[in-house]
Image (tube, rainbow, N blue to C red):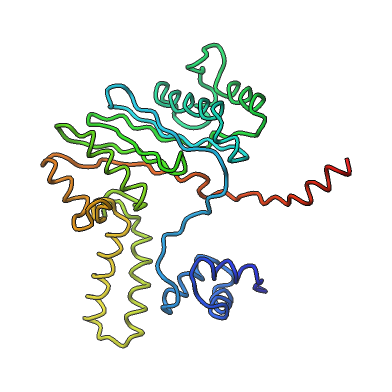
Amino acid sequence: MAITAAQVNELRKSTGAGMLDCKKALEETGGDMDNAVDFLRKKGLAAAAKKAGRAATEGIVAVAISADGKTGALVEVNSETDFVAKTDKFQAFVADIANQVLVANPADIDALFAQDYVKEPGKNVQTALNEAISVIGENLQIRRFARFATDGLTGAYIHAGGKIGVLVDLAGSGDLAPLIKDIAMHAAAAAPICVRREEVDPEILEREKDIYRDKARQSGKPENIVEKIIEGQVNKFYGEICLLEQHFVKDPDKTIQQILKAAGADVTVNRFARFVLGEGLEKKESDFAAEVAAAAGN
């Protein structure tokens, strides 16, 4: 298949590799972007990076926590413009949706839309959304949510006015409120993928090992040294993506696991959810001049 300049440019932006190297990688992999990234990594031409979708829509991520701290909800609601996302009406609606998830415990998005609206019984959430769209004047989307109920404590951190949100479920005894806020703030900054290494997808782990192995063998190292290199690289990989093995952003000399242990022998993170606004969604590019011209022609 013919490789386009747009494909080459996209791969170059995501890997930092040269244009010719990106073109060759795409040709060798039939234009498959993920495989092209792996091809470049095996050649030592691209840095390992977490693949994430482009943040591409407006809106906010918001949280609701029960009075006893045992239940928490995290939601993302999208708007068309940042202007609307900053309005009181939109933010109040998002807060109501977060409370809806907290109180009514929907199984999924479809169930949420069908639920009786907690704020105004007698209408469902879909009707409330439609009314909000009419009042606010933009298309709105309740995109996703997470809800934790625990015997421990839930806590959250919202960054940059709702651009990133983290909800944490922490187990343990004692006053955990300051700690759980620190853990949530760390997760917002460090972007872990899972809590512990046992949760890493085996297929992802094997793919990483294959990349490390190919790179080590290309250097001419003996096989026994290759295996030691792989082990070291895998441990580094765990340290980048596993919350418990990451270095604490407020005290980089300690890992999150060490911070938790210092707080109490029974203190640990059960789970977390991390939402980045617009993650994985394409942003609509607007041509202001074309819009003005079109309006003038109407």
Residue under the point 43% across and 73% down: 41
Query: Where's residue 12, x and y in %?
Result: 54, 71
Outermost residue to the top: 122
Which one is in front, 29 or 244? 244
Quarter holding the N terminus? bottom right
Q: Position of residue 210 (x, y in %)?
A: 36, 72
Q: Residue at x 34, y 73 (%)?
A: 212
Q: Eyeballing the image, is 122 above or below 51?
A: above
Quarter of the rendering containing residue 57: top right
Q: What residue is drawn where x is 53% and y is 79%?
A: 21
Q: Is residue 56 above or below residue 216?
A: above
Q: Is residue 269 left or right of residue 204?
A: left
**Horizontal side, residue 151 vs residue 157: left or right:** left
Choose between 95 and 52: the one closer to the eye.
Answer: 95
- Residue 202 located left or right of residue 23: left
Furthest residue to the right?
Answer: 297
Left or right, residue 26 beside residue 155? right
**If the image is split into quadrants, where does the C terminus sit?**
top right
Q: For this rendering, which residue is in front, 259 or 273?
A: 259
Q: In the orientation shown, which residue stands out farthest toward the left?
A: 265
Q: Position of residue 75 (x, y in %)?
A: 45, 34
Q: Name which residue lies at 48% across and 24% down.
A: 96
How many discs mark residues in the rendered view? Answer: 0
Question: Residue 201 at what x, y percent from top left?
Answer: 35, 55
